[in-house]
Image (tube, grey):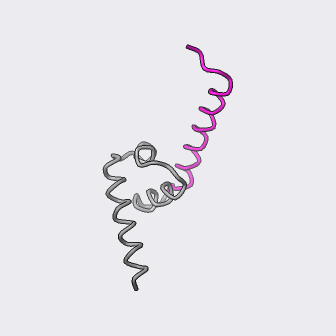
């Protein structure tokens, strides 16, 4: 089944956004990349695909980031 013009356009926009996300986080440590991409609203699976790791690794890092954030608020 052929995709509509709207579906093709959305797919291209998604590709462009993914490329921009990779470029924007290039040079950052993995944990920092995960934090930035998560704040941008990407789900763990998409983040994992973009940075070349597993979604489980991303989830573990996100938990660590949340714990660190809570720890900083208490001080």
Q: Position of residue 52 (x, y in %)?
A: 39, 45
Position of the C terminus, as image quadrant, is bottom left
Q: Nearer the viewer, residue 19 or 46?
A: 46
Residue at 50% x, 59% y: name it. 36
Residue placed furthest toward the right: 5
Secondary structure character of the magenta stretch overall: helix
Residue placed furthest toward the top: 1
Position of the N terminus, as image quadrant, is top right
Q: Is residue 32 left or right of residue 58?
A: right
Residue 53 located within the stretch drawn in magenta: no
**Span colored in magenta:** 1-26
Residue at 61% x, 40% y: name it. 16
Q: Position of residue 71 (x, y in %)?
A: 37, 77
Residue at 59% x, 48% y: name it. 20
Residue 17 placement: quadrant: top right
Residue at 36% x, 53% y: name it. 58
Q: Nearer the viewer, residue 44 or 51?
A: 44
- Tally the marks: 0
Q: Is residue 56 left or right of residue 40?
A: left
The relative height of residue 66 versus residue 25 in the rendered view (above or below) is: below
The relative height of residue 46 versus residue 5 in the rendered view (above or below) is: below
Residue 2 placement: quadrant: top right
Q: Is residue 40 left or right of residue 61?
A: right
């Amino acid at each position: 089944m052929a995709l509509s013009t709207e579906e093709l356009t959305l797919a291209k926009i998604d590709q462009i956004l993914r490329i921009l996300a990779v470029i924007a986080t290039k040079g950052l440590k993995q944990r920092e990349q995960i934090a930035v991409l998560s704040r941008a609203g990407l789900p763990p699976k998409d983040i994992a695909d973009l940075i070349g790791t597993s979604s489980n690794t991303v989830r573990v890092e996100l938990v660590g980031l949340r714990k660190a954030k809570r720890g900083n608020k208490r001080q």
